Image (cartoon, grey):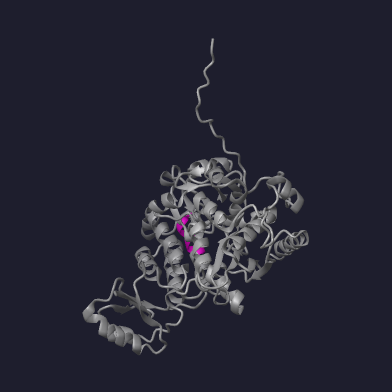
Amino acid sequence: MTVVAVSRPALQTVRLPRLLAGPAGLRTVGLLEHERLHGPLQLRAPGDHARRLSQSRLVDLIEWSGLTGRGGAGFPTGRKMRSVAAAKGKPVVVANGAEGEPASAKDKLLLSRSPHLVLDGISLAAYAVGADRAFLAVHDQEARLGRNLEAAAAARAAAGIDPIPIEVVGIPSRYVSSEQSAIVRFLNEGIALPTFSPPRTHERGYHGRPTLVNNAETLAHVALIARHGDRWFRSAGAPQAPGTMLVTVSGAVARPGVYEIEAGMPIGAVLTSAGDLIERCGAILVGGYFGAWLRMDVAWQLPLTHRDTRSAGGALGAGVIVALPETSCGLAETARVVRYLADETAGQCGPCVFGLPALADALADLAYHGEPGAARRAVRLAGLAAGRGACKHPDGVAQLARSALDAFYLDAARHEERGPCYGIGQPPVLPLPGDMTVW
Amino acid sequence: MSEILRVNPIACTGHGVCAELLPELIKLDPWGYPIVARGEVSGKLLAHARRAVAACPVLALRLQPRER
């Protein structure tokens, strides 16, 4: 009897975690352990011909991988690198590790746990675009994180790993200072406020030079794509949204925290892997404070990709998911966050300076006083704010407010008819800086 | 080449001159800041638009080529 081998593609099981690989717990993965886990970084000083990976090959790999920015906007990373490399002047690389979003913890976790993955990514990005300066921006209030990252960069410098030194800079800890033009302006003038574009940072950024600003998680993916290739990267995730991504899950789940998931995973499955819901929930905040409230029936099956969240009227943002229990008031939650975001305006653009406080007032009137007409007023004010600032701050706030009025329209009507619900007395679910948080 | 009107919201201090000179395309919000109509400036309004751009006391209004 002859045995015929039927060739058929092996069932691929994706090994997770990728970014968060390593020992259990939150211990920092040191340089030696990092190299044992992922292999050493294959970069040599310019002029060394034994170099494994050519510059153009690296950009190709990143483009083919389909990696998109993990900071919120989701722009294709390879294309951004190409335009920076092609722009006039010597490029500069900036890694954005300043997580402005109060409900997100993924970059901070990644930087504390696997700093060398991000630092590898910075060196690779600098190499890919031919940069001669590289910065890693973190919030100045995160003093310990900053010191640890400086120590990690120093250890790499001593071992001669990075072709150019990586400078860790602390930027002011406020919401708008981690916007990319604000980081560049801080490096230029010491003022961490967004600027008007054009010129865009990738054309004229740090001292007028083309500047590649990438989120910390994006660069950690670059470090792995350089080692394992583009096909490996795409073996996880969905065809339209390849790879893995970090999400921060909180609210009414048994195990809130940061999870590495395959992109395109349905939101319901993410909530299940975070220990499942511990209360009945009516709505989910997806994408953070520039994201949107989605009703549970819409959200549960929705795949976590930019395209799917956008078509549901939301945004993927930096992968924030908050489950709101039915006992809480979504309008009150939104009113509180919109007030915070209004206070966080850079104070530069009139429509943001005057429009956001007025929007916060309208939402507060609706949530806490049930004032008739407040919902309509909020919708109108959100429309007035969107698209009229130098940065996307008013747009994000407007989207959050509109989505609340949409997802909680029945509550809004009841508030206006019968006064506020009991939910306004519940402790807040959405975290703000200065809250007593569980993280 | 088609051109669009854009306000630099950081520079704008809400004088409102533009809305007076070009009411067809620019309205003011409740706080006196301009709301500019989207889309390209049609040929017959172009001269008025240029006048509004030139009259802005803080040079916050600009006519620029439409982006891809």
Q: Foreground residue, A41 or A238?
A: A41
Q: Foreground residue, A376 or A26?
A: A26
Q: Is residue A276 above or below residue A155?
A: above
Left or right: A224, with A154 as reference point? left
Count of marks, rendered view: 0
Left or right: A418, with A265 as reference point? left
Q: The N terminus of chain A lies in which quarter of the figure?
A: top right
Q: Foreground residue, B43 or B6?
A: B43
Q: Foreground residue, A331 or A17?
A: A17
> Where in the figure is residue A72, as x and y percent of width and height?
51, 58
Instruction: Based on the picture, tell me whether residue A354 belongs to the magenta stretch.
Output: no
Looking at the image, can residue A279 be seen? Answer: no
As drawn, the residue found furthest toward the left would be B44
Looking at the image, can residue A325 be seen? Answer: yes
Residue beneath the point at 56% across and 54% down? A57
Query: Which range is magenta?
Result: A329-337
Q: Is residue A41 above or below residue B37?
A: above
Instruction: Based on the picture, tell me whether residue A333 belongs to the magenta stretch.
Output: yes
> Where in the figure is residue A125, as x and y percent of width and height?
59, 60
